[in-house]
Image (spheres, grey):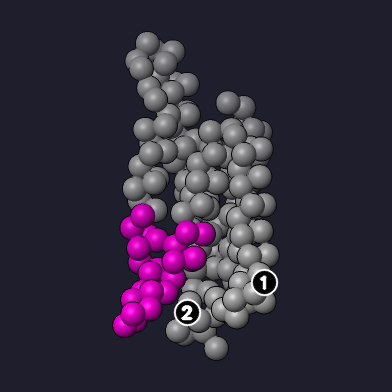
Amino acid sequence: MENSELLIRILLCALLGGLIGLERELSEHHAGFRTHVLVALGAGLFTLAGVHAMEAYSRAGAPVDPTRIAAQVVTGIGFLGAGTILRQGATVRGLTTAASLWVTAAIGTAVGLGFLLGATATTIAALIALVVLRWIERHLFGTDDRDEDPDRL
């Protein structure tokens, strides 16, 4: 992989993760802009490391699967996401934030593998889910995701 392509992928991870994080930040959730940028960057770098290993070791004849490292991103993000979910009595809070972290990791992984269109389309779909569907929930069902986080005003 060329250095310019590597840099573009890393920057795209930061941009796409940052877009989702910006929405979370503007909605005043704990896992906001910086957290989502870091999740996308980390997932992207782990995946790029797998791609790099495949390129380097396959020339030596060793079988390498870049998706093995990417698969571990899924496991690792589960722990981070679980830390954002809180239970207060019968109410569970933080599920949307955990899901946004999970999809941000998937976006970083896709960028790392070079699936740029899929990552960009998923970012757009995630933003629609976070912004447009929140508006629909508020207006049709009278719910508000501010109820999701007890520390928000």
Q: Nearer the viewer, residue 57 or 122?
A: 122
Q: Nearer the viewer, residue 42 or 133?
A: 133
Where disc 2 sits, the SS reads loop
Spot occupied by residue 73 in the image (x, y as percentages of width and height): 40, 45
Q: Residues within 10 Å of mark 2 (few under 14, many from 20)?
A: some
Could one spot residue 29 in this view of the protein?
A: yes
**Which quarter of the figure has residue 33?**
bottom right
Q: Residue at x 45, y 35 (%)?
A: 49
Q: Residue at x 51, y 59 (%)?
A: 100
Q: Residue at x 36, y 17 (%)?
A: 63
**Which quarter of the figure has residue 61?**
top left
Query: Looking at the picture, which amino acid does disc 2 mark?
Result: Asp
Q: Split into 4 quadrants, where in the image is the N terminus?
A: top right
Where disc 1 sits, the SS reads helix
Horizontal placement of 58 versus 129: left or right? left
Residue 92 is one of the magenta-drawn residues: yes
Spot occupied by residue 51 in the image (x, y as percentages of width and height): 48, 29
Query: Looking at the picture, which amino acid does disc 1 mark?
Result: Trp
Spot occupied by residue 55 in the image (x, y as percentages of width and height): 47, 21
**Residue annotated with mark 1:** 135
Residue 53 is one of the magenta-drawn residues: no
Spot occupied by residue 86 in the image (x, y as percentages of width and height): 36, 74
Q: Which residues are magenta?
A: 78-100
- Give the residue furthest to the top: 61
Relative to 68, is 137 above or below? below
Horizontal placement of 48 versus 8: left or right? left
Q: Nearer the viewer, mark 1 or mark 2?
A: 1
**Residue annotated with mark 2:** 149
Could one spot residue 18 in this view of the protein?
A: no
